[in-house]
Image: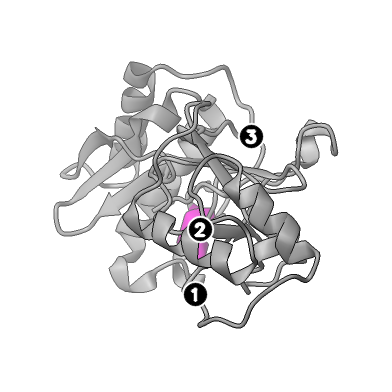
């Protein structure tokens, strides 16, 4: 959605105020927040609409406008409407796309934690993962944890401590798949190889997670890469 160049925060604030006033929200306040996975939010009780300052800084005018109108529609439809038909009708009435998520082609922000699976699919996170995860894309979209698709993490391009729970569960998988017990870099890859070969001992199941990852850059055109959708409030 490209309707002009990248907006600065002053321009975006002025646009938001203009749109809010135009649709009767003259007594509502506007503010910025620090969200990185959510473009906007309607705060009903506080009678405020907020936009993510980090994301607004990389969006063009069309994306900012649609996000503001998305939140204005929430304010007009009321909290009970959610993202249902009543909200969608109001959104389209005032010129919003009526989409729940930001355009997949819009810029996103990468977190400092980078996860890569054995096939090179990639994801980023802003917080350290609390437990080992596997790649859902490699698993054909299934939500079942699969050790052969185990994701390895780095922080800002460097190896980093993963936390007590993560390391405890990683050691348990080492035992399960007959791999030398370790939490050192490369352990996830060794576990994944052992799991793929079918080597495993019988142990209690672990409480682990599945993660959506991007295609590696070399596999697909940039426009076709999977990305986690940025939500609107």
Q: Which residue is mark 3?
A: 1
Q: If you read the primary sequence from the N terminus, does the residue marked by circle 3 or circle 1 appear first?
A: 3
- Near mark 3 (Cα within 10 A), the count class, few <14, some 14-19 or many ≥20, is some
Q: Write down the quadrant of residue 79 in the picture.
A: bottom left
**Foreground of the two, 62 or 121:** 121
The residue positioned 46% from the left and 70% from the top of the image is 86
At horizontal 55% and vertical 31% (from top left) the residue drawn is: 62
Q: Which mark is residue 132?
A: 2
- Classify residue 34 as left or right of residue 128: left
What is the CA distance from the residue labelled 2 to the residue labelled 3? 36 Å
Q: Are marks 2 and 1 in contact (CB under 8 Å)?
A: yes
Chief secondary structure of the magenta portion: helix
Q: How many marks?
A: 3
Q: Which residue is mark 1?
A: 206
Q: Is residue 20 magenta?
A: no
Q: Is residue 137 visible?
A: no
Q: Nearer the viewer, mark 3 or mark 1?
A: 1
């Amino acid at each position: 959605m490209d309707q002009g160049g990248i907006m600065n925060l002053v321009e975006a604030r002025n646009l938001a105020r203009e749109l809010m006033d135009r649709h009767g929200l003259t007594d509502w306040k506007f503010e910025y927040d620090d969200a990185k996975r959510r473009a906007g939010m309607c705060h009903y009780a506080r009678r405020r609409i907020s936009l993510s300052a980090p994301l607004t800084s990389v969006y063009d005018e069309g994306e900012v406008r649609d996000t503001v109108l998305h939140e204005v529609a929430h304010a007009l439809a009321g909290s009970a409407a959610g993202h249902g038909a009543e909200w969608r009708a109001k959104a389209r009435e005032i010129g919003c796309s009526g989409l729940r998520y930001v355009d997949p082609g819009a810029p996103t922000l990468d977190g400092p934690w980078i996860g890569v699976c054995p096939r090179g699919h990639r994801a980023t996170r802003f917080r350290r993962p609390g437990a080992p995860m596997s790649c859902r894309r490699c698993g054909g979209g299934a939500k079942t944890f699969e050790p052969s698709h185990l994701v390895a993490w780095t922080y800002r391009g460097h190896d980093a401590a993963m936390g007590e729970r993560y390391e405890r569960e990683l050691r348990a998988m080492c035992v399960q798949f007959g791999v030398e017990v370790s939490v050192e870099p490369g352990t996830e890859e060794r576990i994944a190889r052992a799991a793929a070969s079918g080597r495993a001992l019988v142990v209690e199941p672990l409480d682990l997670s599945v993660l959506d990852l991007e295609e590696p850059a070399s596999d697909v055109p940039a426009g076709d890469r999977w990305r986690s959708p940025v939500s609107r409030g």
